[in-house]
Image (cartoon, grey):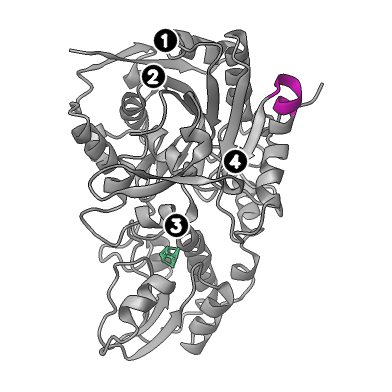
Amino acid sequence: MQRFRVALTQYERPLESVRKTVDLSQGLDHLPPSAKVFIKPNIVFWTRKAQFPKWGVVTTSRVIEDMVVLLKERGVSRITIGEGTVVFDPKDKATAAHAFEYLGYNVLRDRYGVKNVNVFERPFQKLDLGDGIVLKFSTEILESDFVVNIPVLKTHAQAVVSLGIKNIKGMLDVNSRKKCHSADAVKDLDFWIARLADKIPPSFTILDGIYTIERGPGPDGKARRSNILIGSADVLSADMVGAKVLGYEPNQVPHLVHAAKNRNRPMDLSDVEALGAKIEDLASLHAYTFPYNESATLPVPMEKMGIKGLSYPKYDNSLCTYCSGLTGAILTSIAFAWKGEPWSDVEILTGKRMKPTPGKRSVLVGKCLYQVHKKHPDIAEMKVIKTCPPAPEAIITALHDLGVDISPQILLNLETAPGFFMRKYEGKPEFDESFFRIEAH
Ligand code: SF4
């Protein structure tokens, strides 16, 4: 039986810890110097308007630079770093450029001749992954000879974990990303994302767990300094070991179950050779989901506040990036608006699958739900946000019309709001911003 090598190491120092992970996993052993290499970091979120917590959210620049050095040592000269960070305004190219500048990728360009690419400024190409899954991928990754995939070792509120396979979602155009969040409850997000890495060039995955995060993937989660690196030339093996380190058996992660089935692989790691540190010595449970009440109608903290007359059913995995970026802002605005007087039968529905409750006054957030339910006969009163992405102003108006008097402050300042999460990390030196900088000498 073929055995897939996975290296686990503790991050101790620049360059040498990544070198140890690469050497132990033999992940770059067959890479010829002539190869065109594409590095895929994870910059799931960025804003120019606030300093926000990147720990466990964005790949550290430390690991990126160390990988570039190791590639250069192997004589590789054609290296591209590419990412497709979703921003609220599709015409906004400055935010991605700011991320590359801040994270030191331009220093890497000047120091090592690396090319930096915002994939939204380049073409996409349609790929048929089978079983009805057709998506558009960046030609930059498809036309490379080898991919170095460097996601963060993180949890994900919808996908349980977001590791090597899920990181490839950042190579899709925006419409393809929305398609992955399918309205079909069987062929759902997990079914779609399980195939994302199937047709990329040969790759090496290194899970950057210098910082990990609970309730990821964004800055509202709870980061930890974990000092873990996991490397493998086989992305599924890296992800299964990564899931275990985050406290989940691979069979508790639906997209890994699909991916293993598609590849005829066992879920029990019996074909994986884990080298270096022991999985059980590094593993610790990271919660992935936001706690909701038993009826899944309100987050637990809001139920504890005594909120009555309003339900906000728990997000499902049909909710895509733009709408999920609004969820925390809407919920926080509602919590601040609660004055102890029950609201009147308000429900706020999101994603693509939710159904209005007869007799309720329903807010349908986003064009998807609007199109399905615009003629629903049993809704007592309907407020709709018809656009994608949903306009914050329209959400504010809809809630005001139903007597939920939220302050517009948070929803109108979505790009600065993540700055508030910095407070959690104040006075904790282990949360070190320098992991995300590369200084020009
Ligand atoms: S409205 Fe929301 S759920 Fe629908 S496609 Fe847009 S972001 Fe996704």
User: Nearer the observer, disc 2 or disc 4?
Assistant: 2
Give residue 165's quadrant in the image: top left
N-term mark: 1 or 3 = 1
Given the image, on which type of amino acid does mark 2 rest?
Ala
Residue annotated with mark 3: 175
N-term mark: 1 or 2 = 1
Residue annotated with mark 1: 26
User: Looking at the image, which is closer to me, 180 or 348?
Assistant: 180
User: Looking at the image, which is closer to me, 124 or 238?
Assistant: 124
* Magenta-drawn segment: 107-113
Q: Residues within 10 Å of mark 1 (few under 14, many from 20)?
A: some
From mark 1 to mark 3, how far is it between C-alphas? 36 Å
Q: Are marks 2 and 4 in contact (CB under 8 Å)?
A: no
From mark 1 to mark 4, how far is it between C-alphas? 29 Å
Q: Are marks 3 and 4 in contact (CB under 8 Å)?
A: no
Given the image, on which type of amino acid does mark 3 rest?
Asn
From mark 2 to mark 4, how far is it between C-alphas? 26 Å
